[in-house]
Amino acid sequence: MPARVRDFHPGDLDGVLRLWVEQRATSGEPVYSLAEVLASCQSDHAVVAEDGGEVVGAAVGRAARSQGWVVFMYVGRGGDEVAGRLLAALELAMAPAGLSTLSVLLPEDVDHDEAFVGHGFEEKKHLRYLERELPVQQKERESLAELGGRLLPHGLWDAIGGMTHEKDVLERRLVLPLAQPALAEQMGVVPPRAVVLFGPPGTGKTTFAKAIASRLEWPFVEIFPSRLATDAAGLAAALRQTFHAVAELEHVVVFIDEVEEIAAKRSGEPPSPLQGVTNELLKTIPAFREQEGRLLVCATNFVRALDEALLRHGRFDYVIPIGLPDEAARGSIWSRYVPDSAHASLDLGAVVAASEGFSPADIEYAARRASQRAFEQAVGDATDGASTGAPRGPSTQDYLDAIRGTRATVSPEQAAQFHEDIDAIARL
């Protein structure tokens, strides 16, 4: 007796799963994932071919407005005749959706395209199939929202001008192994799970953490110790619950700024109330490291204040210094805040040179101070009738004066201590 073609029933899921696996083994990776195929079986349209109580073929379709798509079609026994009957039954099942076109995407080496051609499908020339896998699936969005996490915009990595040494280290040590895990495994490289970024205040540690998440296209979740401290369960319990929720995400960059607040050196009798929090973090990191597709980034201005146990091998893969912006980075930061009206006449080189030793925050403050000065001058000239044309933007002198009036966040003593910490603590 020929195979019987009928509508899909929930009990056929195992049979469709087996056919999908069989197709992958014989014809290469299917166009649609197993999860997509099984979801469409239950919520869209599907028909199966049954022979002797066994599912030997299946066709699954999905309607998108007036166009229908065959997301899976495979016959393990029965050949093109059964395949043609499945396609006819699927088309009939999808007809009430008001379709005008039924389309299919096939792997290059598929062995049953004759069934589609025989059923009236025509191959379209000069077409390319492009696909983008969305970084966060719907099932993860609720967990991400509860954590206060988000997907960051593209391009944050490229927006960091200069800082070539820091970017190169982060690219080679963090981004590439995480972005290409298969190649890393082939080469015996274990992708990092946790890193510490340290350096003087305002040097861009948070910016780098966000840029890493943007580059990987992973959700970014920032943990604020001060917020956890308000939890009725206590800081240690809140920290544990937060990491438990993070475990529900497939990929994630977790960021803790000023980590010394919850991981300072343990000492004193009786124990400090925060020692329990430090102990909790020390227990949490190994569990966090067991899961793939995640990275913990901790930032600190005072790496010497961290508990020694936190920095031991096995908890953090790297301890990376992030220093003050170099000349190229300062130029990039200044350009971000200089208005278009001032670019043409500005001696950017002089401004960059004068701001050596400034942090990004210092540069932003000085730039806004220069703009405010130029604005007040323009308003005054207009009021006094002294304006001779369109208001000019801030001048080079405005910026130099603003730099002289800005106290650098990082003192020479702090800068010297940072270089000592690189020699004594950094791990690259």
Image: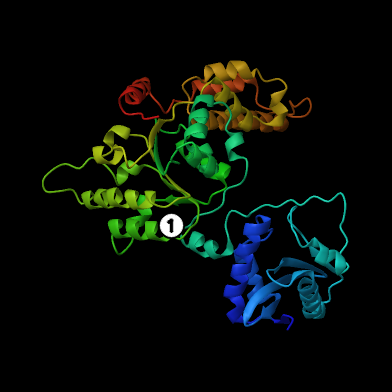
In the depicted structure, whether residue 331 falls above or below residue 237? above
Q: What residue type is labelled 1?
A: Val
Give me the residue at 58% from left, 81% from top.
11
The quadrant of the picture occupied by the C terminus is: top left
In the depicted structure, whether residue 65 falls above or below residue 127? below
* Percent coordinates x, y for residue 427 in the rendering: 36, 30
* Percent coordinates x, y for residue 107 in the rendering: 73, 55
- In the displayed structure, does residue 120 sit left or right of residue 319? right
Residue where numbered disc 1 is placed = 246
- In the displayed structure, does residue 310 sit left or right of residue 46? left
Residue 207 visible (yes or no)? no
Residue in the foreground of this view, choosing between 201 and 33: 33
- In the displayed structure, does residue 67 sit left or right of residue 47? right
In the depicted structure, whether residue 374 falls above or below residue 288? above
* Percent coordinates x, y for residue 146 in the rendering: 47, 62
- In the displayed structure, does residue 249 sit left or right of residue 311? right
Give me the residue at 37% from left, 20% from top.
412
* Percent coordinates x, y for residue 14 in the rendering: 57, 74
The quadrant of the picture occupied by the N terminus is: bottom right
